[in-house]
Image (cartoon, rainbow, N blue to C red):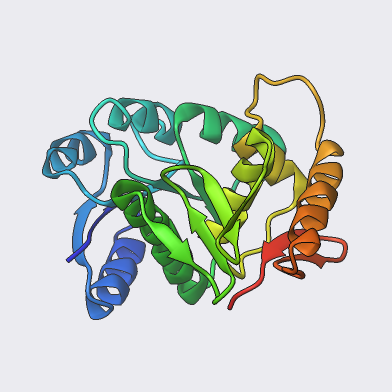
């Protein structure tokens, strides 16, 4: 049973999320402030939901402290959606943002996706997406019809990111942040060129349309 730690000063929201996740088979721990959260973190949750606007200890600072104890996904719950706030959150050690008000079902899907990625990472699995396509995340290689496809590091990084969250749309800025990082010079326009090269290599070996364009938004890995 996966353990989720919910950190939020709103009692009603804590109860709503607790009821939802317990009903969906999770073990839920809660904390209403930073001190409670730091005590709970000793139980090594599998995922943390963290409100940024916390009393006493700011959510970003709390995230930095939590990162000293766990490497699990940390998802921010926040009404703040400015790019500068997102950058601060990722730099503090967060993995994703959920904007308030949010759909609880979307939140549940994102939690599932992050936990699924953690399992793949920890087990260092090879994932077979179809009869033709297999990705070995441990060896960082992709096979089509049992033939290894030559990929540059960033090309595999993009495939790893998108394929770990099949069906989830990533805009170019988010892909750049996750693959290149915040300190890398450049901009998100390089994403389109990398996607083009990946598609060419897949098509060359008879595997097409794995990465779909969502016009005006970004890219996603097609669900099998």
Q: Is residue 150 left or right of residue 18?
A: right
**Relative height, residue 157 to residue 166 (above, below):** above
Spot occupied by residue 38 in the image (x, y as percentages of width and height): 20, 34
Q: Which image quarter: residue 15? A: bottom left
- In percent of the image, x 68 and y 32: which residue is there? 84
- In percent of the image, x 25 and y 80: which residue is there? 23
Q: Quadrant of the N terminus?
A: bottom left
Spot occupied by residue 135 in the image (x, y as percentages of width and height): 51, 57
Say whether residue 121 is visible. Answer: yes
Q: Is residue 123 left or right of residue 191?
A: left
**Relative height, residue 126 to residue 167 (above, below):** above
Count of numbered circles on the image: 0
Viewer-proximal residue among 110 and 165: 165
Say whether residue 8 is visible. Answer: no
**Relative height, residue 102 to residue 55 (above, below):** below
Spot occupied by residue 149 in the image (x, y as percentages of width and height): 65, 50
- In percent of the image, x 46 and y 38: which residue is there? 94
Q: Quadrant of the C terminus?
A: bottom right
- In percent of the image, x 81 and y 64: which residue is there? 213
Viewer-proximal residue among 223 and 22: 223
Q: Which image quarter: residue 72? A: top left
Q: Which image quarter: residue 35? A: top left
Spot occupied by residue 26 in the image (x, y as percentages of width and height): 22, 68
């Amino acid at each position: 049973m996966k353990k989720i730690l919910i950190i939020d000063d709103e009692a009603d929201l804590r109860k709503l999320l607790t009821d939802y996740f317990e009903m969906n088979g999770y073990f839920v721990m809660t904390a209403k402030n930073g001190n409670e959260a730091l005590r709970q973190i000793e139980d090594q949750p599998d995922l943390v939901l963290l409100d940024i606007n916390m009393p006493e200890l700011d959510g970003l600072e709390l995230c930095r402290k939590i990162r000293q104890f766990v490497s699990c996904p940390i998802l921010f719950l926040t009404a703040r959606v400015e790019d500068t706030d997102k950058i601060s959150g990722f730099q503090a050690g967060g993995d994703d943002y959920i904007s308030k008000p949010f759909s609880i079902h979307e939140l549940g899907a994102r939690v599932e996706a992050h936990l699924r990625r953690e399992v793949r990472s920890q087990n260092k699995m090879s994932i077979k997406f179809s009869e033709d396509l297999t990705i070995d995340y441990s060896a960082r290689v992709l096979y089509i019809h049992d033939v290894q496809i030559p990929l540059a590091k960033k090309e595999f990084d993009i495939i790893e990111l998108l394929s770990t969250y099949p069906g989830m749309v990533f805009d170019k800025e988010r892909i750049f942040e996750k693959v290149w990082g915040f300190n890398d010079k450049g901009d998100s326009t390089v994403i389109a060129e990398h996607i083009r090269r990946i598609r060419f290599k897949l098509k060359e070996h008879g595997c097409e349309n794995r990465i779909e364009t969502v016009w005006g938004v970004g890219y996603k890995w097609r669900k099998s």
